[in-house]
Image: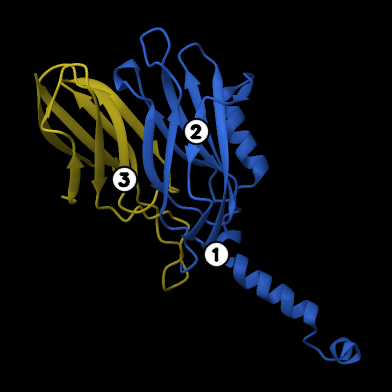
Chain colours: A yellow, B blue
Amino acid sequence: MARVLINLPARAKRGEVIEIKTLIAHPMETGYRLGPTGAAIPRDIINRFTCTYNGDEVFRADLFPAIAANPFIAFFTQATESGEFAFSWTDDHGQTQTEVRQIIVE
Amino acid sequence: MRERSEGGPPTRRLMLLAAAGLGLAPFARPAGATPAAMDEAIRALVGEATVTRGKVKLEVPPIVENGNTVSLTVSVDSPMTEADHVTSIHLFNQKNPQPYVAAFHLGPRAGKASVSTRIRLADSQRVIGIAWLSDGSFWSDSADVIVTLAACAEG
């Protein structure tokens, strides 16, 4: 499991627009670099990131090799109700890592 | 000086060509994206619609030392209501091996149409952000970035 950093407020007022910052440790191998033998290193990137808020998708990103290693994505969403955010990263092999964070909306 | 370079086998022109070849080698292999390739990728996204400059703000440093990580923020001037919001934001570049950088899908629940990320730039080039609004219109902004150390140069 790759290391993940997620930054979002623990508490928010109803209707408040909050910023969520995410980062996952991943080489984001482009497939354009050459290895020591001169053969291209096969592509291995995270191509999709999604964020759901109590089951509803609030943000999604399609990523390409031009995204830097350890992809960092920051975005905004409106705090509507207490509950959980689920963050999922999917790589080229179809493997998905999901992390969950709670928020209290008052 | 001139006579020597014309007579000797490794002329200055040859040396320049060799130097250019060396510099290009990492990117020349998978035919790099060109401004035309970028236009094609944008056309594939927007179809026949016109892309208007404005509303979108692309914040990226004008000069970066390391093309491997370039911080970038793209924001769109939009009320983000059910009736009028940003559906998606797309990033393109001119000279990386692929013109597409990323696509961000938002909705009215975002509250604020602003996304930050870090990208790779293989060369000094122009970056373009295009926003797709809920009324079907497209808006864009572009930024020129000078890169002193290109991404994947070590590879």
> Which of the two labelled residues, at mark 1 and mark 2, occupies the earlier sequence position?
1
Q: Which-is-in-front pick, marks 1 and 2?
A: 2
Badge 1 density bin: few <14, some 14–19, many ≥20, Cα 10 Å:
some
- Name the spot of residue B84 as percent of width and height, x first: 43, 11
Label 3 secondary element:
strand
Residue drawn at (22%, 25%), measured in percent from left and top?
A52
Badge 2 density bin: few <14, some 14–19, many ≥20, Cα 10 Å:
many
Mark 3 residue type: Phe
- Name the spot of residue B57 as percent of width and height, x first: 49, 33
Q: Nearer the viewer, residue B42 or A30?
A: B42
In the rendered image of this protein, does residue A82 appear above or below residue B60?
Answer: above
- Give the CA separation, mark 2 to mark 3: 19 Å
Label 1 secondary element:
helix
- Where residue A36 sits, quadrant-wise, is bottom left
Give the chain letter at badge 2. Answer: B
- Left or right, B122 with respect to B18, comes to left
Q: Is residue A94 visible?
A: no
Judging by the rendered image, the residue that carries numbered circle 3 is A72
Q: Which-is-in-front pick, marks 2 and 3?
A: 2
- Left or right, A71 with respect to A40, comes to left
Which disc is residue B43 wearing? none
Q: Nearer the viewer, residue A93 or A87?
A: A87
In the rendered image of this protein, does residue A58 appear above or below residue B73?
Answer: above
- Give the CA separation, mark 1 to mark 2: 32 Å
Judging by the rendered image, the residue that carries numbered circle 1 is B26
Judging by the rendered image, the residue that carries numbered circle 2 is B57
In the rendered image of this protein, does residue A70 appear above or below residue B45?
Answer: below
Residue drawn at (42%, 39%), measured in percent from left and top?
B73
